[in-house]
Image (tube, rainbow, N blue to C red):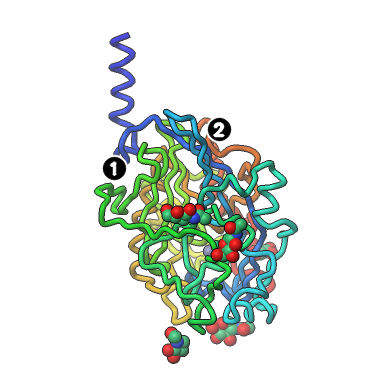
């Protein structure tokens, strides 16, 4: 018994999540993911990432929404949260600034036969059981169009939680706002305050949402003031980082030397990258003309866009937040999922399945390099024949 305890203690002490500053706890939440639909953005790749390889100017983003369930240890009471909602079903009815963009056809949504409220109700999750919706981010000027759904469909009892410094002005009192009064009407709102929290994980200030170590909200500014992400403990020693818009394409986070050590890229993908990645746009120490070498690539494939029309209000701050999140990505105890990672849409177990078993299921090993697979829809590293 003593030996077992000592071994357990040793395993705990060496658990890699401790290196990120995450404390020990046995409290967990259940995490389930929905895809609300696909956002098609014409000529928009350059607004989030560089370089843009000819033929890959437009992007198609899935929009993930997460259901978080927490059971209080003492009372047994269940609390349900949503982290992001995807887009509303009628984007043309967004505030004029952003609605016009969808009305013009430059942006359009497919695969949203049911919005998140309909998917929840069909799945036996009454909207009245959702205590709060957490908005991870803001879109362009000041709304998070592809994250905030349509709050008017939720009962007043569902609160809204957002990050510090979020601009909550609404149209029409602020003519530039992309938020509507109906986005708030009737709902209690909570602006997170990081000044009272002493927790810092990989350089990111954290709030312990339930006070038991099961679910943290991390301050990840840069996309715009108020951008937050989440860290869910799904077993006592494994986690899911809900990255929001910290990055949009997996190539903005990968490869990284530490990730390559923890999760080596499979041989067949290294070989495929050799012939399919354009060496006019991507290079590394062991790369030869027409033969790209991923293993020796010291930095991510793609950078955060700092062009004048970048999605990121503060590209330099966003790049710093991203470097902090990249440490989670390299950790064997953490699965990082961002809101629009198209490379994993075919591999994620969606609702009603739970994501909690990702580590035992080897899900990370099978998903983390999908973005570099030339067969994957998110592959954008070759000069496309169409260009
Ligand atoms: C795509 O966007 C760039 C930068 O905003 C612009 O210069 C270019 O004209 C656009 N191309 C098309 C086909 O709209
Ligand atoms: C909003 O919060 C206030 C103060 O905590 C509370 O009295 C009220 O019932 C809440 N409203 C809703 C709709 O939950
Ligand atoms: C709206 O945007 C315009 C153009 O950027 C700016 O001149 C104006 O001051 C803004 N209005 C408000 C209320 O912020
Ligand atoms: C919900 O809030 C709205 C806006 O404040 C209010 O008009 C409505 O009566 C409320 N609904 C209920 C059922 O309390
Ligand atoms: C490059 O990628 C496009 C899709 O983006 C694909 O249709 C094309 O066959 C690829 N070409 C090469 C040479 O890999
Ligand atoms: Zn987004």
Please state the horizontal and vertical placement of residue 217, each as a whole percent of the image. 39, 51
Which residue does the numbered mark 2 point to in the structure image? 361
- Against 51, residue 256 (above or below) is above
Mark 2 surroundings: few (<14), some (14-19) or many (≥20) residues within 10 A = few
Q: Is mark 2 within 8 Å of ligand 6?
A: no
Q: Nearer the viewer, residue 352 or 247?
A: 352
Indicate which disc residue 140 carries: none
Indicate which disc residue 21 carries: 1
Q: Nearer the viewer, residue 130 or 253?
A: 130
How many callouts does the rendering have? 2
Residue drawn at (33%, 25%) of the image: 11
Q: Secondary structure at mark 1?
A: loop
Mark 1 surroundings: few (<14), some (14-19) or many (≥20) residues within 10 A = some
Residue drawn at (28%, 47%) of the image: 199
Q: Which label sits in the foreground, 2 or 1?
A: 1
- Against 362, residue 279 (above or below) is below
Q: Quadrant of the N terminus?
A: top left
């Amino acid at each position: 018994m003593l030996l077992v305890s000592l071994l357990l203690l040793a395993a705990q002490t060496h658990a890699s999540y401790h290196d990120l500053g995450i404390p020990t706890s046995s409290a967990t939440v259940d995490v389930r993911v929905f895809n609300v639909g696909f956002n098609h953005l014409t000529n928009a790749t350059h607004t989030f990432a560089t370089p843009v390889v000819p033929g890959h100017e437009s992007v198609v983003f899935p929009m993930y929404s997460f259901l978080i369930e927490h059971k209080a240890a003492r009372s047994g009471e269940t609390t349900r949260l949503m982290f992001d909602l995807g887009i509303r079903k009628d984007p043309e009815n967004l505030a004029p600034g952003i609605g016009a963009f969808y009305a013009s056809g430059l942006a359009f949504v497919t695969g949203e036969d049911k919005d998140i409220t309909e998917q929840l109700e069909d799945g036996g999750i009454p909207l009245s059981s959702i205590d709060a919706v957490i908005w991870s981010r803001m879109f362009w000027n000041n709304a998070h169009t592809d994250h905030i759904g349509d709050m008017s469909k939720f009962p007043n009892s569902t609160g809204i939680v957002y990050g510090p410094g979020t601009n909550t002005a609404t149209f029409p009192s602020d003519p530039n706002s992309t938020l509507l009064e109906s986005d708030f009407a009737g709902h209690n709102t909570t602006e997170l305050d990081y000044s009272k929290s002493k927790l810092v994980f990989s350089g990111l200030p954290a709030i312990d949402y339930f006070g038991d170590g099961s679910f943290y909200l991390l301050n990840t500014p840069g996309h715009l003031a108020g951008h937050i992400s989440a860290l869910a403990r799904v077993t006592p020693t494994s986690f899911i980082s809900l990255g929001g818009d910290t990055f949009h394409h997996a190539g903005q986070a990968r490869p990284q030397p530490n990730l390559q050590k923890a999760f080596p890229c499979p041989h067949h993908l290294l070989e495929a990258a050799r012939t399919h990645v354009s060496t006019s746009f991507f290079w590394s120490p062991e790369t030869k003309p027409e033969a790209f070498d991923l293993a020796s690539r010291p930095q991510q494939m793609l950078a955060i866009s700092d062009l004048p029309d970048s999605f990121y209000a503060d590209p330099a701050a966003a790049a710093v937040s991203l470097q902090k999140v990249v440490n989670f990505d390299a950790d064997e105890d953490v699965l990082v999922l961002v809101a629009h990672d198209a490379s994993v849409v075919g591999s994620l177990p969606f609702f009603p399945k739970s994501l909690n078993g990702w580590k035992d299921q080897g899900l990370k090993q099978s998903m983390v390099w999908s973005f570099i697979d030339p067969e994957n829809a998110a592959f954008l590293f070759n000069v496309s024949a169409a260009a």
